[in-house]
Image (cartoon, rainbow, N blue to C red):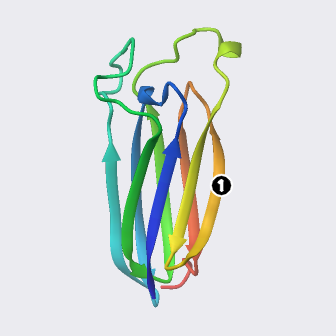
Amino acid sequence: MAPYRISIECDYREFWRYNLALSGEVRADGSRVGYIAYTDDVAAVGSQLSSAPAGYKRPRRTVVEGAAGDALTLYIYIVPNTLPESRIVADSAPFEVAVSISHGDSVVYNRRLLINQWSGDNIEIKLGDVARG
């Protein structure tokens, strides 16, 4: 069995308006062998920032290593900490976030997801035989 490696990347110029959290579990032979808990908070929700905080760099990339196993259930939370710059919905098109998951030497998930600027998103990813156990 190999470990899972999760990579999330976004070059959207205002991705600083969002906090990122990952939660999930790795299973092997039907039993949980690892838990994923990761947060990348730029600012408290409701901060009303007018610009990116000092030191914020693009693209924003997060890499998280999980335990070795044969199944992964992962939840990705992209939560706005500041509303979009424009209050006109038509000016606030969704932006892309790239999510890639490797299992050992193989890429088992590779998607570009569209994220709503107003609500963020909650993403569920299930890989392997997560129903066992």
Q: Quadrant of the N terminus?
A: bottom left
Q: Residue furthest right?
A: 90
Vertical position of residue 32 compared to residue 73: above or below: below
What kind of element bears circle 1? Answer: strand
Vertical position of residue 8 compared to residue 13: above or below: below
Quadrant housing residue 48: top left
Three-letter amino acid code of the residue under disc 1: Arg
Position of residue 56 in the picture relative to residue 116 (left or right): left
Position of residue 43 in the picture relative to residue 97 (left or right): left
Vertical position of residue 83 compared to residue 114: above or below: above
Classify 10 Å Cα crowding around label 1: few (below 14), some (14-19), many (20 and above).
few
Total labels: the figure holds 1
Position of residue 107 in the picture relative to residue 63 (left or right): right
Please give the name of the residue rendered at 45% of the width and 83% of the height, measured from the top-left corner: 2
Please give the name of the residue rendered at 64% of the width and 9% of the height, measured from the top-left corner: 88
Residue 67 position in % (x across, y down): 36, 76
Is residue 78 or residue 14 the one in the foreground?
A: 14
Position of residue 43 in the picture relative to residue 118 (left or right): left
Residue 53 position in % (x across, y down): 31, 22
Please give the name of the residue rendered at 29% of the width and 29% of the height, measured from the top-left corner: 55
Is residue 1 or residue 56 the one in the foreground?
A: 56
Vertical position of residue 95 compared to residue 126: above or below: above
Residue 130 position in % (x across, y down): 54, 77
Which residue has dot 1 on it?
111
Residue 96 position in % (x across, y down): 62, 38
